[in-house]
Image (cartoon, rainbow, N blue to C red):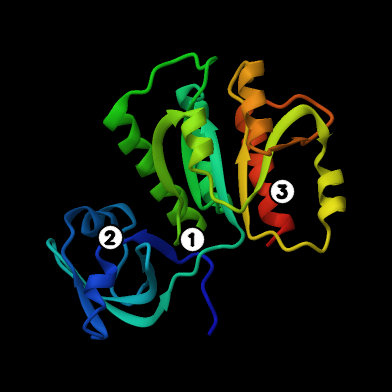
């Protein structure tokens, strides 16, 4: 079936519940979602839309629109599949603007989960629930834009040693470091080897301290240089995840 590349994708948190009874037409009553359809996107009956939650995504056609609800016809319903390989990204608490930009990029690229990390050179404090909720909204916006229906799980900040203890196992663990071996060498050495799970990490602004790097080495991280130049953390994170996702797609 031909797809319109410009179809809007919107998070519908209770989509799985709405489609559970197998009815073709479903009614959306979520105030925010109705507002976005009617007042932000200004969609009209018979226009196409994609609705998704973490379990399903549906290709739909708008049927009726009122001030309080929208009725859509589900033309196709699909079960979401996790993008492989699994990518867990250990992300230090960067400055707020940089952190938000990178979280958006990591969602677009398709990482599986993002674990925020407290490191010794972090230059600011974590703002708790308000900041977590803002990052969640950024993840949803990026998921809608990129049609990444299995958008990453976000985990609140923890100490580096705790994050390392909770890393997926087995997994290929890589740390972006300008003094490491070129990433191309890692690819050459592992060519033909199936990689099912990665743990990636970058340093914060100002880098990790030596003791933190020793923790990574003890946890069997390979230190890899992404480019012959020094990248800012926000750039390094996007480049790193993008290379891995593209190479092992």
What is the residue that sits farthest to the front in this orientation? 218
Q: Earlier in the sequence, mark 2 or mark 3?
A: 2
Residue 107 position (above or below residue 182): below
The residue beneath circle 2 is: 13
- Quarter of the image with the C terminus in it: bottom right
Check disc 1 and report the residue beneath it: 147
- What residue is drawn where x is 69% and y is 31%? 217
Foreground: 75 or 207? 207
Separation (CA) of disc 2 from disc 3: 31 Å
Q: Secondary structure at mark 1?
A: loop
List x then y, in percent, for residue 48.
Answer: 39, 73
Q: Is residue 102 visible?
A: no
Which class describes the residues within 10 Å of circle 2: few (<14), some (14-19), or many (20+)?
Answer: some
Label 3: element kind = helix
Q: CA distance from mark 2 to mark 1?
A: 15 Å
Q: Are marks 1 and 3 in contact (CB under 8 Å)?
A: no
Relative to 151, 131 lies left or right: left
* Viewer-proximal residue among 62 and 12: 12
**Closer to the N terminus: mark 1 or mark 3?**
1
């Amino acid at each position: 079936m031909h797809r319109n590349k410009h179809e809007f994708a919107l998070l519908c948190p209770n989509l799985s519940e709405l489609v559970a009874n197998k009815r073709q037409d479903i009614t959306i009553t979520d105030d925010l979602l109705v507002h976005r359809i009617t007042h932000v996107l200004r969609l009209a009956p018979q226009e196409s839309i994609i609705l998704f939650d973490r379990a399903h995504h549906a290709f739909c056609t708008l049927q009726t629109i009122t001030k309080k609800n929208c009725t859509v016809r589900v033309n196709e319903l699909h079960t979401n599949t996790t993008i492989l390989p699994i990518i867990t990204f250990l992300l230090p608490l960067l400055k707020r603007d940089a952190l938000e930009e990178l979280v958006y990029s990591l969602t677009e690229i398709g990482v599986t989960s993002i674990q925020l990390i407290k490191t010794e050179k972090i230059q600011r404090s974590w703002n708790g629930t308000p900041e977590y909720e803002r990052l969640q909204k950024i993840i949803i916006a990026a998921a809608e834009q990129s049609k990444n229906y299995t958008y990453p799980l976000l985990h609140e900040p923890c100490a580096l040693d705790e994050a390392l203890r909770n890393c997926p196992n087995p997994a290929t663990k890589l740390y972006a470091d300008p003094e490491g071996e070129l990433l191309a060498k890692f690819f050459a050495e592992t060519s033909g080897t199936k990689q099912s799970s990665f743990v990636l990490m970058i340093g914060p602004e100002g880098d990790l301290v030596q003791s933190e790097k020793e923790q990574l080495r003890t946890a069997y991280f390979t230190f890899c240089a992404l480019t012959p130049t020094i990248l800012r953390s926000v750039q390094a994170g996007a480049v790193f995840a993008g290379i891995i996702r593209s190479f092992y797609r």
